[in-house]
């Protein structure tokens, strides 16, 4: 177990170094940072001074080393667009995205897993057919359309919920949260559902397919032959055996929710990372882009690490060295 | 003892199992009747597809849909169990009828320890506390011959070998002393060297626990060694049923005869193994009359038209017109 974690951490560091190199390369190849920072009429001497101060005259490996050292402390310099340190901007935007992703992941899980179990167990019931049809719509409609439809229905026609933005936040000093006020929750609901819908249908279909698979296995038949209750069979034996693939997909999906909540954030004018990166790309704001790259990679690596650890928790076959003959 | 001891433990009467399909209904088990008495080992033999396993599944109420019991009745200790509600049937399964499946590698849930699966089953059917159930689980593991049961009880199925896993499966089937154990090809998936051990263990434990056994297999050797009585199935029907000695040494039905002729025996090496021409008909094309008639060397006109009932011949009952005394006398 310990060796496994060490090995995974080592791999994670390796991945992060590669990503760091890519985002370091951004600075090298996308324009001249000095040009971006000084005015049109700066003298050659001023430019040279800035170049020296920024360490751009150092050999490339040394620059990379400096970059990695700074990146490890999450320092990516000043945003070209806003002129304030990138880490400050990110610290401002990240909570919005993380809370949004958290809410939609919870919605997707709490609704998707039971729906998947239900449709897996009651394959031919009318309700299962309704779920499957609705999930087909959820999977095939593009996110922005769902967002716009939700805004139209609940924001404009019914006027129950705000149509855009993130309001009612409470500043905890290091984290600005929507979770503490009713207004905050109200503005979370629509983007949360929009972002969750695709994941929800995916999880439901995955759980359903896995349940159907597992229910056909001998150990489920044997569990029935032992007279166990339906509850014990369906939830204790069957559902647990569907977890490994479900955890894998959920892990990957949460990663991509963090990375690609761009569309939802744009539709709802949600002040998160997605909106930030769109603006950064439009302005060629390299420090923001490279910090985003590193940050998202870090999330993916962390989530994958957690997923690997969860495998260990769920499946004993991975946990113990093989004992006895096989 | 009350007169329930006179009565067979399990009575199957005119059992019919059907599979509705798009092209019509397939009759997989066709109106069969048999009994199992308390403590008895009934061997059920036949080729794959003869309906042996389906019969076993029907008795314990675990036919896979769309398969269903279309007729007849099944009684356990005189109580009808084929029409019980799921909830009531659940109390019969495990508690009154235990089951051992073919493949020990897939019969156990890989995510739970052997002990947990035993404790769970014991607690489903008894009022034992967690601790008592665990103690019983360890005793059972010891009883099925698993060394160091105190340690093994907390191990996962993948840490056991195939033979050891089948022992665990047997412990699970017997853990609340059912009156009947249905063993569906319990040794087919095991190494030959382990098969004999498992069969011996199964027989010994069932007699110690006072459980009757319905032993489903295609292995006549296993039957000859283990069973008290044998039922030979062919194309969803019983061809012959009788004491093991009569059926093995003095087979009456031409199919049983052919089946016995196909077993190699040491000391008979001059004799060629006989084989039955052709193969068992598919469920969609079972011939009229006796299902065996196209392959039977003794078939005559009546066999092609009229389905034979089980006729009493000595200790056995045989579904073959060759043994219809009344008809024979009439012909003479």
Image: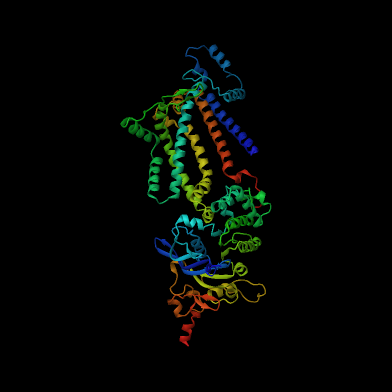
Point out residue B229 in the picture as x, y percentages from the top left corner: 57, 70
Q: Seen from this angle, which residue lies furthest front?
A: B2
Q: Where, by quadrant of the figure, is residue B245 drawn?
A: bottom right
Observer-nearest residue: B244 or A28? B244
Image mark count: 0
Point out residue B235 in the picture as x, y percentages from the top left corner: 48, 69
Image quarter of the N terminus of chain A: top right
Q: Where, by quadrant of the figure, is residue B100 drawn?
A: bottom right
| Residue B201 located left or right of residue A167 | right
Instruction: Identify the residue shown where x is 37% and y is 35%.
Output: A145
Q: Seen from this angle, which residue lies furthest bottom?
A: B332
| Residue A141 located left or right of residue A300 | left
Q: Seen from this angle, which residue lies furthest right?
A: B148
Observer-nearest residue: B268 or A183? A183
* Above or below, A107 relative to B256: above
- Residue B169 visible here: yes
* Above or below, A231 relative to B44: above
Point out residue A183 in the picture as x, y percentages from the top left corner: 40, 26
């Amino acid at each position: 177990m310990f060796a496994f974690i060490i090995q995974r951490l080592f791999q994670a560091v390796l991945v992060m170094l590669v990503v760091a190199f890519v985002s370091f390369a951004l600075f090298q190849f996308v324009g001249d940072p000095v040009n971006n920072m000084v005015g049109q009429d700066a003298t050659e001497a001023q430019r040279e001074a800035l170049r020296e101060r920024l360490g751009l005259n150092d050999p490339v490996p040394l620059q990379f080393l400096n970059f990695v050292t700074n990146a490890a402390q999450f320092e990516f310099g000043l945003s070209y667009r806003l002129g304030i340190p990138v880490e400050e901007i990110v610290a401002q935007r990240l909570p919005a995205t993380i809370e949004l992703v958290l809410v939609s992941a919870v919605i997707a899980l709490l609704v998707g897993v039971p729906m998947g179990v239900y449709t897996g167990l009651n394959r031919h019931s009318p309700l299962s057919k309704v779920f499957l049809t609705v999930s087909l719509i959820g999977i095939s409609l593009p996110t922005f359309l769902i967002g716009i439809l939700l805004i139209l229905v609940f924001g404009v026609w019914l006027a129950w919920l705000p149509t855009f933005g993130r309001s009612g936040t409470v500043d905890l000093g290091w984290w600005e949260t929507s979770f503490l006020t009713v207004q905050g929750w109200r503005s979370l609901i629509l983007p949360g559902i929009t972002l969750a819908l695709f994941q929800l249908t995916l999880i439901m279909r995955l759980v359903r397919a896995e349940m159907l698979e597992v229910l056909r296995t001998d150990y489920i038949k044997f569990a029935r032959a032992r007279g166990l209750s339906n509850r014990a069979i369906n939830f204790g034996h069957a559902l647990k055996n569907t977890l490994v693939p479900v955890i894998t997909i959920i892990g990957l999906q949460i990663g991509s929710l963090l990375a690609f909540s761009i569309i939802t954030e744009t539709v709802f004018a949600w002040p998160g990372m997605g909106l930030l990166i769109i603006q950064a790309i439009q302005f060629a704001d390299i420090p923001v882009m490279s910090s985003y790259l590193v940050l998202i990679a870090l999330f993916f690596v962390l989530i994958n690490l957690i997923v690997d650890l969860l495998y260990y928790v769920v499946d004993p076959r991975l946990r113990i060295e093989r004992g006895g003959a096989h | 003892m009350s007169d329930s001891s006179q009565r067979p433990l399990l009575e199957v009467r005119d059992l019919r199992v059907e599979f509705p399909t798009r092209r019509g209904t397939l009759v997989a088990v066709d109106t069969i009747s048999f009994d199992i008495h308390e403590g008895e080992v009934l061997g059920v033999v036949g080729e794959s597809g003869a309906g042996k396993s389906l019969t076993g599944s029907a008795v314990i109420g675990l036919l896979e849909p769309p398969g269903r019991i279309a007729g007849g009745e099944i009684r356990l200790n005189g109580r009808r169990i084929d029409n019980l509600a799921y909830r009531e049937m659940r109390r019969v399964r495990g508690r009154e009828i235990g089951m051992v499946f073919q493949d020990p590698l897939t019969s156990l849930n890989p995510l739970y320890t052997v002990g947990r699966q035993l404790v769970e089953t014991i607690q489903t059917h008894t009022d034992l506390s967690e601790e008592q159930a665990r103690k019983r689980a360890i005793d059972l593991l010891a009883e099925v011959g698993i060394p160091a049961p105190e340690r093994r009880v907390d191990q996962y199925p993948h840490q056991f070998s195939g033979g050891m896993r089948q022992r665990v499966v047997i412990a699970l089937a017997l853990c609340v002393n059912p009156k009947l154990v249905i063993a569906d090809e319990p040794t087919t998936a095991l190494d030959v060297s382990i098969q004999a051990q498992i069969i011996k263990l199964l027989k010994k434990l069932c007699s110690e626990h006072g459980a009757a056994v319905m032993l489903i297999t295609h292995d006549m050797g296993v039957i000859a060694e283990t069973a008290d009585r044998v039922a030979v199935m062919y194309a969803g029907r019983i061809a012959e049923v009788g004491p093991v000695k009569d059926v093995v040494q003095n087979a009456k039905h031409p199919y049983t005869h052919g089946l016995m002729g196909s077993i190699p025996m040491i000391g008979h090496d001059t004799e060629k193994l006989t084989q039955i021409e052709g193969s068992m008909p598919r469920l969609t094309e079972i011939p009229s009359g006796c299902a065996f008639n196209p392959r039977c060397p003794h078939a005559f006109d009546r066999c092609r038209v009229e389905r034979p009932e089980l006729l009493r011949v000595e200790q056995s009952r045989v579904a073959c017109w060759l043994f219809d005394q009344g008809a024979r006398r009439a012909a003479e």
